Image: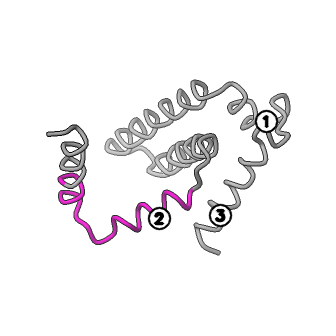
Amino acid sequence: MSSNDSLARLAAVIESRKPANGGDPSASYVARLLHKGPDAFLKKIGEEATEVVMAAKDADHGADRAKIVYEVADLWFHSMIALAHYGLTPADVVAELERREGTSGIEEKALRKAQAREGAGE
């Protein structure tokens, strides 16, 4: 089973928890976050990103590296809630990563800056 399958299954569960699809905010954490709106799940993404950083810093000083995996899982999960809210899927993210494959990060960043300049009319 591929990680894409796991992400797709999780995305389907998140989708089913949307209030519009019958998700019950009193019975589901995902439904509650979606019901509260973007501020709720975006705040969680910020918190989880900070926890990833803290776990990594702790690992630099001998803490268990598995904590990084745990925190990244939380970050990905909450990011997937945001994707669902905006009508996007993990497959969209994977497609973007695949699009970038073989392009150096430096080239990618330069291209984005050039596109931003063009869009700003420079």
Kind of residue sitting beneath label 3: Ser
Which image quadrant for residue 56? top left
Residue highlighted by disc 2: 95
Quadrant of image for the C terminus? top left
Disc 1 packing (10 Å; few <14; some 14–19; many ≥20): some
Q: Which residue is mark 3?
A: 6
Q: Could you say which is closer to the camera, residue 111 or residue 6?
A: 111
* Residue position marked by numbered label 1 in the rendering: 19
Q: Residue furthest left?
A: 122
Residue at 59% over, 67% down? 4
Residue type for callout 2: Ala
Q: CA distance from mark 1 to mark 2?
A: 27 Å
In primary-sequence order, the first of circles 2 and 3 is 3
Q: Is residue 85 above or below residue 93?
A: above
**Residue 109 drawn in magenta:** yes
- x 41%, y 62%: residue: 97
Q: CA distance from mark 2 to mark 3?
A: 16 Å
For marks 1 and 3, give the CA distance.
Answer: 23 Å
Residue 98 horizontal/vertical position (percent): 41, 68
Which residue is rendered at x = 68% and y = 31% of the image? Answer: 33
Magenta-highlighted stretch: main secondary structure? helix
What quarter of the picture does the N terminus occupy? bottom right
The stretch in magenta equals 90-110
User: Given the current orientation, which residue lies at the most extreme front position?
Assistant: 121
